[in-house]
Amino acid sequence: MAWAPSGAARLQVLCIGNELSIEVLLFTAPKASQSLRFKYDKGAFENDQGSVGRTGNTIVASKWTGGGRAETIARLIAARKFTLEIGDAAYDFDLSSGGKTISQIRCPLA
């Protein structure tokens, strides 16, 4: 698992089953479904819909799942910063050393 903390949240890339999964662990429980937006480095914000993840205190954007998962992983590896906004809360994640860590994760873990 690779992760990058941001005060009240943690961006996690981990193996679930045989695939990498991307989620944000919030230290306050998220609403069941809510709009969010995110950007990589100084790029434009992308709007998306988030849903509560598998543990009840994580949020997962729809673009981070299914066919969008591989693109998201590639963009996280290449980025130095990831910004996520959920409602009025904003989280900045420093990915300056995370790309190397993320690219080394292999699923399933032995």
Image (cartoon, rainbow, N blue to C red):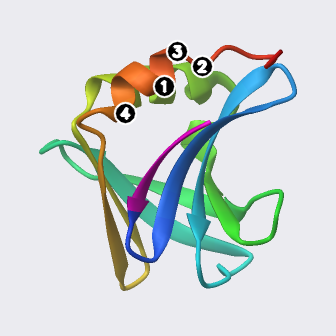
* Label 3 – label 4 distance at C-alpha: 10 Å
Q: Is residue 42 left or right of residue 9?
A: left
**Does dot 4 land on a helix, a strand or a loop?**
helix
Q: Is residue 40 left or right of residue 29?
A: left
Callout 1 amino acid = Ile
User: Is 37 included in the stretch rendered in magenta?
Assistant: no
* Label 2 – label 4 distance at C-alpha: 11 Å
Q: Are marks 2 and 3 in contact (CB under 8 Å)?
A: yes
Quadrant where the image shows the N terminus: top right
**Does dot 2 land on a helix, a strand or a loop?**
loop
* Label 2 – label 3 distance at C-alpha: 4 Å
The residue where tag 3 is placed is 104
Which residue is at 61% across, 61% downward? 50
Q: Say the numbered circle drawn on residue 105.
A: 2
Q: Is residue 75 something that shows in the picture? A: no
The residue where tag 1 is placed is 102
Which residue is at 83% across, 15% downward? 110
Which residue is at 27% across, 52% downward? 45
The answer to whether residue 26 is above or below residue 71 is: below
Dominant secondary structure (helix, strand or loop) of the stretch shown in magenta: strand
Q: Are marks 1 and 2 in contact (CB under 8 Å)?
A: yes
Magenta span covers which residues?
1-5
